[in-house]
Every structure is written in C-alpha cells, then in structure tokens.
Image (cartoon, rainbow, N blue to C red):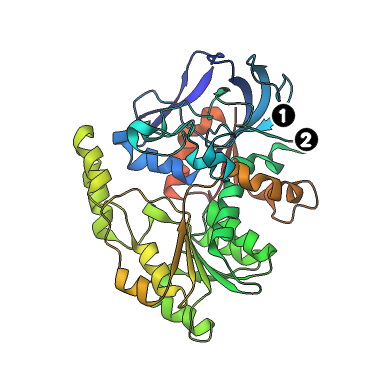
C-alpha cells in the first residue's frame, strides 16, 4: 500500500509499505477513504523529530470502510463505514468509564509515562502506524471506531476523528456561562471549529490570529476578529475595552507550542532540531522548549474568576508560569487531549441535519495521498489559504 512516511525534519514521502494485517483478534483493517492533515502533524514535521523513527507512517484523522475484523470484534463487519478516533482506547477500563479515553489504562504508553496510544504519533504515544495511508490496522476495534451512515460525503463525518471532539471539548472545558464571552487564540482548524461551536451555543466569540484567510473565514461566521499583527502589544487591553474592562469570561488557547511572538523560544526550538536525537529528546522534555506566548496572553485576557481552556499542544516540562497572577485572578485551568468517544454522541446529531457547523465546506484543500508532501509544506508555510487539508487515498 501507499503511505505517508516520516524521513526527517520537513521530509515526508509517500512510500510503499506492506498492507497491514490482523495481529490480534481485537483488530480490524479499514480501507481509508479520507484522512486529515492536522496541526499536530506539523509538530512532527518541524520540532518533534527526536521522538519519531524514520519510516513511521503519519496521520491520526482517518475514516473509511471495514475490510476485515478479528475474531473477537463483534460490533464491526466488512463494509461498515467508520471514523477512527485519534486515540486507541478499550472502552472498559476505569479511565474509559470516566469518559477519559485519552487516559485509557489498557493502551497507556507506560514506558514513556504517557496516556493512551495514538495513531501516527511518535514513540511517546506508542509508535502506532498512522492513517495517512491506503489501509490502517485498528487495535481494540470494537471500541476504537465511530459508525457513520452511508450516503453523505466523507466530510460530513471525517472531523469526528479529531477536529470536532477536540474543539467541542475545548468549548466544554472553557465553562463559558450562558450568554457569556470567549476569546479564541488561534483560528487554525481547531480554533476555527471551537469558535463555530461556541457561536452555535449562543456565546460571544472574539477570535485572534495573524493570517488573513483565517481572520476572514472566522469573520464570515460571525466571530469578532482581531489581528495579532496589529495588537501584539495591546491585545489584552483591547479585549478588556470590548468587555466592560474585565476581559472575556473564558479563553481557549488553540495555539500551543506553535505560538508566534516568542522569537527567543523559536530560536531554541530550531537549535533543538540541530542536536543529536538522544540529547534533543531530553532537552525537549525537561528544558522548557515550549513557546508560551499564547498562554501568557490567555492569562492576561481572561477576566478574574474566568477559565482558560488549553487545547493547543504543549510539550515541555520546565516552562515558567506566572503563578502569582494565576492565583490572584482565581483563574481555572482546564486542558488535555480530547476524549473523542465521550463527545461523539453529542456531536453526531449536528452532522446529520442542516450542517450548522459548516463541516461540508470546512476543508480548504482536498488532495490525493500522493500530494501529501506538498500538502505538508503548504500547510506549514500557510500558503494558498491552506487552513484544513483532507487527503484522499
């Protein structure tokens, strides 16, 4: 089969790989019909090379058709149409019972001290082959799937793998009061969708970005947008001026370690990329390599007694936090990888009606799998208005 494979920093290629096969009786094999390119994939493309082996298959946003199911898989049959969550979870452990599928005790990557295994995402999360490929082996397939109906186009459902539940959890964790306000920092795929969900729930949404196409797209949906290029030094003050001097009730940080505005940390990231992997891995984990600009902005923007929902990925272990301010403002922090199966039942009704979240036109680019290397470069450089790319194996 063809699969998108990591070979080094900014070097991904479509290679030939053996077709996956059933390895455990709880496995299933799906033929991938659509698979998304995620902002988290750019972390692998750019700065997380020390944690990934050359030849690894990338991707964690797939959907497709079941080709084969293992002998212990009772809920799936060949021909079923399914979306595959980005994390692998069993559905019957303590954590899954709590709705915390990203902490699944059956698939936790304990030798790395991490939570549930993820598709296509480094040894930190199990080195499981990903879904930017023609076929995918799905472990724990009886639970690690979402059945979807035949008929509607893939783009009605493919975002259930990551974008929709991640954005949904970001809004839920933000604890926005009824009729309240939220600032969304970063209007990439997750921030854009979080803004749409918050609007759908009746909240006032202020969106911040520095890419024209993202700002225009959010504005057309009803978001009040602010250009960070114009307000990098006074953003929090501007937002307080729009909210009776207080700041918004909540802030969603949908940026994470890709944050702009921290040139020193950017240089540190680039320097880490030049280190030998064994050294760079330790520095990334312990040396505070995150670019914290968006998080610091969130702390400044949120009103006293408000909530910050961190959904952008952070990876360092020694980042300094302004604890005096966080404590004094009584800020509540919520965060974590999205628990896909927890939120899917709430989201599904919105995908089988009039499409209030605009999923059918959410993708800016639809490309064949063979074009994946060019897609990564275009997405990383924010060229050609690339906001969300869906690959079609």
Q: Residue 294 in the image: x percent, y percent?
A: 39, 63
Q: Nearer the viewer, residue 52 or 9?
A: 52
Q: Is residue 159 above or below residue 119?
A: below
Describe the element under mark 1 as helix, strand or loop. Answer: strand
**Residue 304: quarter of image:** bottom left
Q: Is residue 255 above or below residue 208?
A: above
Q: Earlier in the sequence, mark 1 or mark 2?
A: 1
**Residue 9 visible, this angle:** no
Residue contact between numbered discs 1 and 2, judged by CB atoms under 8 Å: yes
Q: Residue 292 in the image: x percent, y percent?
A: 33, 60
- Left or right: 93 as drawn, with respect to 54: right
- Give me the residue at 46% from left, 73% from top: 302
Q: For mark 1, what is the residue?
A: 81
Q: Nearer the viewer, residue 128 or 371?
A: 128
Q: Residue 23 in the image: x percent, y percent?
A: 53, 14
Assign the C terminus to one quadrant of the image: top right
Residue occupying the far front of the picture:
94
Assign the N terminus to one quadrant of the image: top right
Residue 149's tag is 2
**Residue 295: quarter of image:** bottom left
């Amino acid at each position: 089969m063809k699969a998108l494979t990591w070979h080094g920093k900014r070097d991904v290629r479509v290679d030939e790989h053996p077709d996956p096969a059933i390895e455990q009786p709880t496995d299933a094999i799906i033929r991938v019909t659509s698979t998304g390119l995620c902002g988290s994939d750019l972390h692998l493309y750019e700065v997380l090379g020390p944690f990934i082996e050359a030849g690894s298959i990338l991707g964690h946003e797939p959907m497709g058709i079941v080709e084969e199911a293992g002998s212990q898989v009772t809920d799936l049959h060949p021909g079923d149409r399914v979306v595959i969550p980005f994390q692998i979870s069993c559905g019957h452990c303590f954590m899954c019972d709590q709705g915390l599928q990203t902490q699944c005790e059956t698939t936790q990557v304990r030798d790395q001290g991490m939570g549930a295994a993820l598709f296509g995402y480094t040894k930190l999360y199990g080195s499981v082959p990903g879904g930017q490929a023609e076929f995918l082996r799905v472990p724990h397939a009886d639970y690690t799937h979402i059945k979807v109906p035949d008929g509607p186009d893939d783009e009605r459902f493919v975002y259930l793998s990551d974008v929709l539940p991640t954005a949904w959890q970001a809004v839920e964790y933000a604890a926005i009061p009824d009729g309240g306000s939220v600032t969304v920092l970063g209007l990439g795929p997750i921030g854009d969708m979080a803004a749409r969900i918050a609007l759908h729930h009746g909240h006032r949404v202020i969106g911040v970005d520095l890419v024209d196409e993202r700002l225009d797209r959010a504005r057309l949906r009803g978001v009040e947008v602010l250009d960070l290029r114009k307000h990098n030094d006074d953003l929090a003050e501007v937002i307080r001026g729009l909210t009776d001097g207080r700041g918004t009730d909540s802030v969603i940080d949908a940026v994470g370690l890709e944050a702009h505005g921290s040139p020193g940390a950017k240089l540190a990231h680039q320097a880490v990329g030049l280190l030998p992997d064994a050294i760079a891995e330790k520095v990334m984990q312990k040396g505070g390599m995150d670019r914290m600009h968006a998080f610091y902005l969130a702390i400044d923007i949120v009103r006293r007694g408000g909530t910050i929902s961190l959904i952008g990925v952070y990876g360092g272990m020694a980042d300094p936090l302004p604890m005096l301010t966080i404590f004094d403002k009584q800020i509540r922090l919520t965060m974590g990888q999205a628990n896909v199966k927890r939120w899917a039942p709430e989201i599904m009704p919105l995908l089988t009606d009039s499409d209030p979240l605009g999923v059918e036109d959410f993708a800016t680019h639809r490309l064949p799998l063979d074009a994946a290397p060019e897609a990564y470069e275009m997405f990383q450089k924010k060229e050609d208005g690339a906001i969300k790319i869906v690959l079609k194996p």
